[in-house]
Image (cartoon, grey):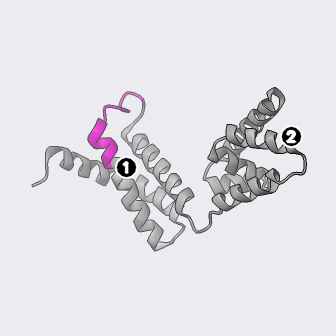
């Protein structure tokens, strides 16, 4: 027998299944395996959020549909970046570290290591995009964000690196 909370959750999923499937389809790109995996991951994330907070957490800030969309999108994006066969982010970061750390000047190597310690893995991935010469459109497609958001993100990361480099 299902509890009241489980029934309410089931009704919520049925009501907003179009939003959920749209996100799953966008990230799975027609791959049946990733479609099923994302469906499960998003279902788990939504249940965890719903069972912990119910709808009270976002109800005053946004609609149910927006709440569902935010959780589904963030879960799918995170899953895609970690598990996509098209993603080489870890290899790029290691390649970047190996290439730039192997300089002849010990002071440059020290500065580089300090800089790499100051940025997150995500920022390193974005730095990889920049150094590989990817344009904002390609970065936006890879990250599943708008071109404008990619520009802003890249600007902020490069600005952080410039400030860190100038301040030591």
On residue 107, which mark appears? Answer: 2
Q: CA distance from mark 1 to mark 2?
A: 46 Å
Q: Residue at x 69, y 48 (%)?
A: 124
Nearer the camera: disc 1 or disc 2: 2
Q: Position of residue 39 (x, y in %)?
A: 39, 61
Residue 52 occupies quadrant: top left
Q: Position of residue 10 (x, y in %)?
A: 24, 52
Secondary-structure class at tag 1: helix
Would residue 123 appear left or right of 73 to someone viewing this image?
Answer: right
Please state the extent of the stretch shown in magenta in the rendering: 47-61
Q: Position of residue 97 (x, y in %)?
A: 74, 53
Q: Residue at x 49, y 63 (%)?
A: 25
- In the displayed structure, would residue 3 be above or below residue 55? below
Would residue 59 appear left or right of 108 to someone viewing this image?
Answer: left
Q: Residue at x 50, y 72 (%)?
A: 31
Nearer-the-camera pick, 106 or 162: 106
- In the displayed structure, would residue 1 be above or below residue 153? below
Q: Tell me if I can see residue 18 in this picture.
A: no
On residue 59, which mark appears? Answer: none
Q: Is residue 154 magenta?
A: no
Residue farthest left in this picture: 1
Quadrant where the N terminus is found in the figure: bottom left
Secondary-structure class at tag 2: helix
- In the displayed structure, would residue 34 be above or below residue 4? below
Residue beneath disc 1? 45
Q: Residue at x 72, y 57 (%)?
A: 138
Nearer-the-camera pick, 100 or 6: 100
CA neighbours of label 1 inside 10 A, class few (<14), some (14 to 19), many (20+): some
- Name which of mark 1 and mark 2 comes first in the sequence: 1
Q: Position of residue 120 (x, y in %)?
A: 64, 42
Quadrant where the C terminus is found in the figure: top right
């Amino acid at each position: 027998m299902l509890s009241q909370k489980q029934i309410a959750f089931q009704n919520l999923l049925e009501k907003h299944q179009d939003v959920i499937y749209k996100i799953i389809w966008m990230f799975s790109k027609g791959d049946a395996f990733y479609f099923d995996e994302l469906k499960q991951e998003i279902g788990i994330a939504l249940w965890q959020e719903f069972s912990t907070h119910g709808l009270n957490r976002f109800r005053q800030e946004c609609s149910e549909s927006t709440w569902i969309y935010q959780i589904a999108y963030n879960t799918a994006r995170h899953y895609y970046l970690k598990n996509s066969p098209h993603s080489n982010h870890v290899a790029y970061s290691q390649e970047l570290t190996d290439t730039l750390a192997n300089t002849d000047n010990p002071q440059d190597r020290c500065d580089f290591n300090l800089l790499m310690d100051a940025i997150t893995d995500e920022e390193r991935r974005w730095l990889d995009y920049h150094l590989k010469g990817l344009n904002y459109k390609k970065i936006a497609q890879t990250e599943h964000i708008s071109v404008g958001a990619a520009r802003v993100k890249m600007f902020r990361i490069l600005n952080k690196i410039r400030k860190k480099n100038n301040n030591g």
